[in-house]
Structure formats: C-alpha cells, structure tokens
Image (tube, rainbow, N blue to C red):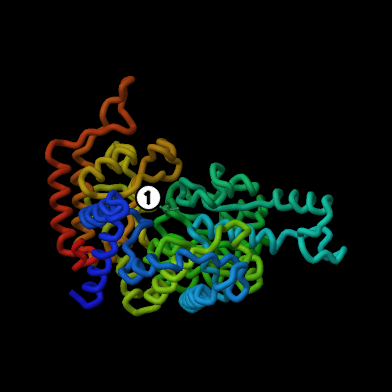
Amino acid sequence: MSDMTAAADRAYREALSVIESVEPRIAAATRQELTDQRGSLKLIASENYASLPVLLTMGTWFSDKYAEGTVGHRFYAGCQNVDTVESVAAEHARELFGAEYAYVQPHSGIDANLVAYWAILAHKVERPGLAEKGVKNVNDLSEEDWETLRHRFGEQRLMGMSLDAGGHLTHGFRPNISGKMFHQRSYGTDPTSGLIDYDALLAQAREFKPLILVAGYSAYPRRVNFAKMREIADEVGAVLMVDMAHFAGLVAGKVFTGEEDPVPYADVVTTTTHKSLRGPRGGLVLAKEEYAPEVDRGCPMVLGGPLSHMMAAKAVALAEARTPAFQQYAQNVADNAKALAEGLQKRGVKLVTGGTDNHIVLADIAASFGLTGRQAESALVDSGVVTNRNSVPADPNGAWYTSGIRLGTPALTSRGFGADEFDRTAELIVEVLSNTTAADAPKGGASKAKYVIADGIADRVQAEAEELLGKFPLYPGLEL
Ligand code: DSN
C-alpha cells in the first residue's frame, strides 16, 4: 500500500466514524456504496472513479464559503482563498484544452449549457435602446425596449442532435428548458449507417438558420468532425457550441486531436468534469475571449453561488489530466471500447453504427435478443453488470423502454481493465442476455418491462464478474 493510500484509509475511517456519531445510516450507506461499486461491472458511459486526491478535496470547509461573482470581483468579503482556487482551476482548464477562456463555476453539464445559452443570447441578440439611447445596463431600459428585448430572446433558434440519434436533452429536447426557450430543430443520423450526414445537416441548417448550432452527444458512438461543423455554422451564420461532456477526457488526453478537437473550432465549449475527464461532479465552460464577459455572469444569471470545494476538486482533477499517465488512460479508454465492441459483435450482437471510435458502445438489444433496453438493463443489474438503457435511432420502443443499452469504458479502464477483460465482459453480457426472455404482460403479449433469466445464470455471472473485478481492486488499501 502506498503512503498516500494508507493516509487516505486513515482519513476516511476517521471521517466515517465522525459521521457515524451523528447519522449512522449515512455512514453505513457510504460504506455500502463503496462495496457495491467495487463488486459490479460499471459500464455506465457517463460514470467513472475519481482519484483519492479529488475525492478528498471535495470534503472541506470551502463548502462553507459564499463567493458569488468572479475572481477579484465578489459580492462577499473574505474570498481570497476562493480566488486562488478558482484561478488555479481556470488556469488548468485553459492550458489543458488550449482555450482562450475558462469558467469553472457550473455545478453540472446542464448548468454549463444554460450558462452558454444565455451568454450566446446576451452576446448575439441585438439589444434595443442600448446603443442608440446610450443606455449602459439592461436594467435601465425602458419598459417598451425591455419588452422588445424579451421577445427577441424568445425568437431565437437552436439546432442540436436528436435524442434518439444520441444527442442530449439539453440540446433542444422539448421536455427540457432548451426546447422551450428556443425554436428548435433536431438533426439525426443517416438511417443506414447511423452516422452524422454532414451534407444533410448543412441542408437542414440552411433551411432553418439557427442562431446556435450544437454539436456533441451522450450516446453517439463515433467521433465528430468539428471542422465540418464550423463550416456549416459559418455557412448559415450560426454560433457553434460544442457539448463535450462525454468525451472531454479523450480531448484532454489527446486522443481527439485536429478536426476531432472541438476547442479550436467552437465559439463556446461546455463539459462536465466527472465523466471521461475523471474529476468531481461538475461542469465548466470554455469560450473564445469575446464571450468571456457574458459567460462570467453565469452566476447569478442561471447558477447559484459557486461551490468552492468542487472548484478546488476540479483544479486537482485538471492537474491530473495534464499528465502523461492521463493521456495513456484516455488512449486505453478508446482502445478498450473497440475491444468491447468486437467482443459483442463476434458473439452476434448488433451495434448502432457497426462499432465505435470513442468510449461508447450502443448495442441494439431488440434486434439482437428480442428484449427491450429496460429488460436488458434490469437483467444485467441482477447479474452484477451496471449499464443503462438507451434509445436507438427511430426507436420503436420509445425513450422509456428503449431498444438499446449504452455501454462505456471510462470507469473500468480506471480500474485497469484492458482488452482481455473487456472481451470477457462482452462474454458475460451475452451470457445474461441470451438467457433472458420477455415475460408475459398481464393483458397478454410480451411485457416491455418484465423478464425471466434462466435459473442460475445471474448468480453465476455475478460471481464471475466479482472474480474478474477482484484482480483490479477499486481504491486498493481502503478497508473501511
Ligand atoms: N447523465 C448523462 C449521461 O448519462 O450521459 C447526461 O446528462
């Protein structure tokens, strides 16, 4: 055990006994969560395991400090240490991604996207009365000009990838505020290849003329060409915003370079910090300098006060992501996704787009096993394999039951899994799903939710998963 792990072991043991003295159920749930995460194959593409330094940084008294505003310009006194934290995190983010400007306050990816949307609106939508009447602040606009401005904000157009093609709900999906605050249009993927068709996208953008073109995804198993996205945005006069929440680790780790790196091409880039980037839960915004004044107003425009303890943990994680070890990790994530995809395909599983070149594998479960995504997700959880159900393009089972499961390699790669272990993981997944059948629905026909796993399979796969995981311990040395 390294000195660092031994110190973390002591720290967590003492911390849990302090927590236990106040609310034992929370201490017990915290211990149980570690046991559960250690004992299952975590394949949720948006999850990971942060390092001990990142985890420890989250639990400090920075949580107790209010710090609305920005570095050196706060609405509260006594923010000198928060200023240090925010400056260091932003410096790492700028240097890691080669960005002109970084804002590290967003609490999540959704928050980061809201900050970006408002910043783009504020930067691009012409404000009546401000220039010609010499008004400096929107608060001083006349009622009439203010009304005009609100209408202008409400008239803007956004175009993002559709949910069932792999886009995110914040990219203009109607049940999300982005689908309500903008007139929205979605672009899909080619029905045969499952890939983005840039010519079709350009034709759609020409016709719709969005103010904001959003690139990025949550469930698209392929790389995006951001140079082409930039050309399309320029052709129609749109702002290019990229949500790289899922693949930020592959950008940071220099797996996505050149035209696959969104930062040089996009006006604004948003991300979470906890997915492939392997940091604490949170978000950040990178932008061209011209958007900085508006992005800086994220709090209080759409964000609550900054979570200084989380900004501190982001700084630690971003420092980790600047190391050669992280670059190797990112390459392994992509290589392992290929191994997982090949392991599934050679056992007869149909994959959306026929494979992967990022960290995501999207398996068409309905086509491969005659199950819904929901049945597959549940049968796998019963067997110690944690995934999530996901729509496939033009999904006949809708967004609730779905026809697919989404698998991702960031978490198990952090534990040290390589190609052999991902091939074995594919074997275990197929063993469960080929021994699972849809149960009868109460009103006749097949249920979309209930299922039956053949006797003994779930226990056997769970035991085999635990044996595999035992060779790659999570936080080794932590014996709580
Ligand atoms: N929850 C994230 C994901 O699973 O992709 C997106 O918000």
Count residues near mark 1 (Cα–Cα under 10 Å), then give few for <14, some for 14-19, many for 20+.
Answer: many
Instruction: Examine the rendering and report whether any part of residue 251 can be seen.
Output: no
Q: Quadrant of the image for the C terminus?
A: bottom left
Instruction: Examine the rendering and report whether any part of residue 120 can be seen.
Output: yes
Which image quadrant is residue 239 in? bottom right
Indicate the position of residue 268 as horizontal and vertical percent values.
58, 66
Q: Which residue is mark 1?
A: 352
- Helix, strand or loop at mark 1: helix
Q: The residue under label 1 is which amino acid type?
A: Val
Q: Is residue 389 left or right of residue 287?
A: left
- Please tell me which residue lies in front, 141 or 272: 141
> Mark 1 CB in 8 Å range of ligand 1?
no
- Please tell me which residue lies in front, 278 or 239: 278
Query: Most extreme residue toward the front, as rendered?
Result: 21
Which residue appears at 79% of the width and 51% of the height?
148
Q: Is residue 207 above or below residue 443?
A: below
Q: Quadrant of the image for the N terminus?
A: bottom left
Indicate the position of residue 256 as horizontal and vertical percent values.
43, 70
Which image quadrant is residue 402 in? top left
Indicate the position of residue 431 as horizontal and vertical percent values.
18, 46
